Amino acid sequence: MKAVRASIERNQAAHRERDGRAEIEARLATLTPRERQVLDHVITGQLNKQIAADLGTGEKTIKVHRAHVMEKMKVDSVAELVRLAEHAGIQPATPGRA
């Protein structure tokens, strides 16, 4: 019985993991291409002005995109955003090269 229970628990954990990843991927799918670029830069730890320079746009524009990313991804902090990105398999690129 212990082996059966352990197997059931592993199966349930795998389902939760898959469901969680699917939810994150659904949130990622709501991002515009530019918001996705901003996300990729934010998770590297870049500042808004660094992202703006890399993407050739203004810092205020990056602030707007960043706010949209945070809202669409349903997170309140960059730390949460990084955790979600890691869970989805998104690896931070080297700053300035994304």
Image: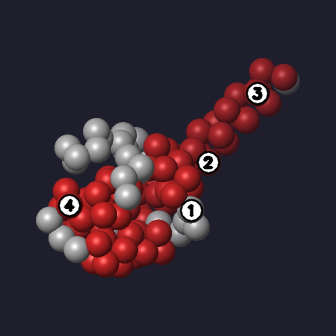
Which numbered disc flags the more N-terminal residue, 2 or 3? 3
Camera-nearest label, 2 or 1: 1
Which numbered disc flags the more N-terminal residue, 4 or 1? 4
Residue 8, placed above or below residue 81: above
Kindly report the distance in space between the C-alpha atoms of the residues bearing marks 2 and 3. Answer: 15 Å
Identify the disc placed on residue 6: 3
Q: As rendered, which of 20 and 36 lies closer to the eye?
A: 36
* Residue beneath disc 1: 77
Which numbered disc flags the more N-terminal residue, 3 or 1? 3
Camera-nearest label, 4 or 1: 4
What residue do we see at 56% from left, 62% from top?
Answer: 77
Which color scheme did the rendering employ for the protein? Answer: secondary structure
Task: Label 1: state its secondary structure.
Answer: loop
Mark 1 neighbour density, 10 Å: few (under 14) some (14–19) many (20 or more): few
Identify the disc placed on residue 53: 4
Q: As rendered, which of 49 and 23 lies closer to the eye?
A: 49
Camera-nearest label, 4 or 2: 4
Task: Label 3: state its secondary structure.
Answer: helix
Work out which residue is located at the far left of the displayed protein and give it.
Answer: 56
Which numbered disc flags the more N-terminal residue, 2 or 1? 2
Amino acid bearing label 2: Arg
Give the image location of residue 63, x and y in percent.
37, 74
Give the image location of residue 88, x and y in percent.
43, 47
Residue 2: image quadrant is: top right
Identify the disc placed on residue 16: 2
